[in-house]
Amino acid sequence: MTVNDLQRQRLLLQLEYEHEREEFRRLTQAMGIGRRVKRGDCWWPATLGRSYYNSLNQLVVEVNRSPDEADVEHNFEHGRQVAFFDVSGTDDINYLDFSATVNYAESLRMVVIVPNEAAVAKLHGAQRLGVSLSFDETTHRLMMGALDRVIKARGNRLAELRDIFYHRSLTKQFTFAPLRFPWLNATQEQAVNEVLRAKDVAVVHGPPGTGKTTTLVEAIYETLHRESQVLVCAQSNMAVDWISERLMERGVDVLRVGNPTRVTDAMLAQTYERRFEDHPDYPQLWAARKTLREMRASRHGGESYHQRIDRLKSRIAELEVNIHNTIMGNARVIACTLAGSANRVLDGTHFATLFIDEAAQALEAACWIAIARANRVILAGDHCQLPPTIKCVEALRGGLGTTLMERIVTTNPQVVTLLKVQYRMNDDIMRFSSDWFYGSQVESAPQVRHRSILDWETAITWIDTCDLDGQEEMVGDGYGRINRAEAQLTIATLTGYVERIGRERMLDEHLDVAIISPYRAQVQHLRQLVRRNDTLRPLRNRIAVNTVDGFQGQERDIVIISLVRANDEGQIGFLRDLRRMNVAITRARCKLFILGSVSTLTRHPFYRKLYHYVQQLND
């Protein structure tokens, strides 16, 4: 049945692809520029910076957006496809006839790879330039190609790994006495040993705050005592950067393939492009490429001209290969996204071990892109937290959301190690999550068990919003829901709590705050309210407002959740995805506020039990 299951996965992935393409076309046609700017899918007006050839001989152009949009989080990141457009005096949108790719993106500036000099000329000819995300077919093609390879695999390591993930089988292990790591707790130490013993696959299951990253870094570090190089992947650029930075802190040499979205100086220095530019032979290569471009531009014919061209091309190829081999040979860890593992700089490279972080957020097909490069696979994550993003309801119902991590947990539970001690939050905050999602197996470390900011306060407070003057409302097509009255009460709750603590203490002790809502429209509205609030103004750098997805892997001293939904029918939409709520309620170290309509939400058993749990704490 394995091949049939994979063929079904491919059909579901095709459904998702067609749905996303059609949805993108519909929204692009129906939505004005202003709305797309607010969604973070468009920069307009945009201005051009310099254009130049980067270290990989790609023609790139710098694009800047208005500083007024700095508070709008955008969705541009490395590898995303974009389209440029010009807005005429009649406000007609005219798309330029070429596509481009984001090389890297910051808050107000990004560098975009364009096809040729003619494209740069067209950009400079635009009067009111804008840039928009375009439908990205590249990742879908990579995933479908990966599934095709897995389906066709016969008599090789890829076929063996496929069968391990799809069948109940006794996975193989090396045999050796357990290694001791006194700086880790018992389950973390066990997880590292299980990773080192695994010949096929191992899973590090890390509930919130249990030190999954610490454990994974230790496992990678120990693996590098046995192997010269490993591949480390994750679904998102942010997750790749996070694990890369932790490895660098341990002194591990990391090569970052694909520019990181968060372009810190430390991470930029680890990128393949920067290492390429820093190689001693790069000035020779740059000069040779420049000469070749100038010769081609002059278009002088003759036999000697063609001979010189051929000699230059041979010299360029030789230098490129030498630089590439030096860079790849020196790196101990190659770090990239799952889709980035298809990057041409990794062609011909195979790894003994692949580590996939945040594996429970990655589509199965995306994991197979990277698995094709490895002999064994280590998965780390938590399938009780954020799932993969799937937009097609039919594909979701068909099982596209079932991840490889969930599959191996079901078929081969013996390879899973659950981390059981959390170091993040007050025990009362952790306890509900442990009971509901982890069979009450997760315990709090003694040093955080009674973590709090104010004396004698309860760690969780639920503020019922059902009596507010106003209910949820839709904002625009596909943009989300908003509850203005609840947003006002959210800010009032935070303001009151800050006044109880004292602003000076907040600043002196560097206390930080997360305001979380599942709905993007509510997030945007809450950000506006924070900016306008005089009490909160001195603390703005300590207050982050974002969706649940935006806070995955993060933590704050104080967390306020605005659940938005308030209606007479008891409809809660995607709040039924309880994994997102697990993420939301476990971001808080010391104090958690939940704002939501009790009459609407408690018709669902999860929210009913959570509400009663909070009430018992406060009795």
Image (cartoon, rainbow, N blue to C red):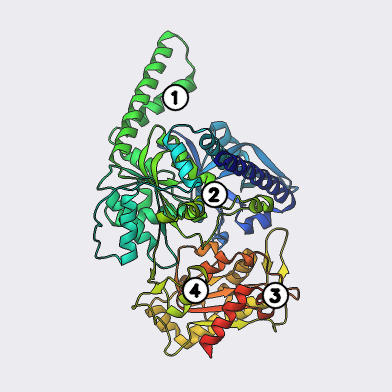
**Which residue is under mark 4?**
435
Few, some or many residues within 10 Å of mark 2 (<14, 14–19, 20+) = many
Few, some or many residues within 10 Å of mark 3 (<14, 14–19, 20+) = many
Q: CA distance from mark 3 to mark 4?
A: 27 Å
Identity of the residue drawn at 49% across and 46% down: 167
Visible residue check, residue 189? yes
Amino acid type of the residue tagged 1 in the rendering? Glu
Q: Report the mark closest to the observer, 4 or 2.
A: 4
75 or 153: nearer the eye?
153
Q: Are marks 1 and 3 in contact (CB under 8 Å)?
A: no
Q: Report the mark closest to the observer, 1 or 2.
A: 2
Q: Secondary structure at mark 4?
A: helix
Give residue 363's mark: 2
324 or 585: nearer the eye?
585
**Which residue is under mark 3?**
566
Amino acid type of the residue tagged 4 in the rendering? Asp
Q: Secondary structure at mark 3?
A: loop
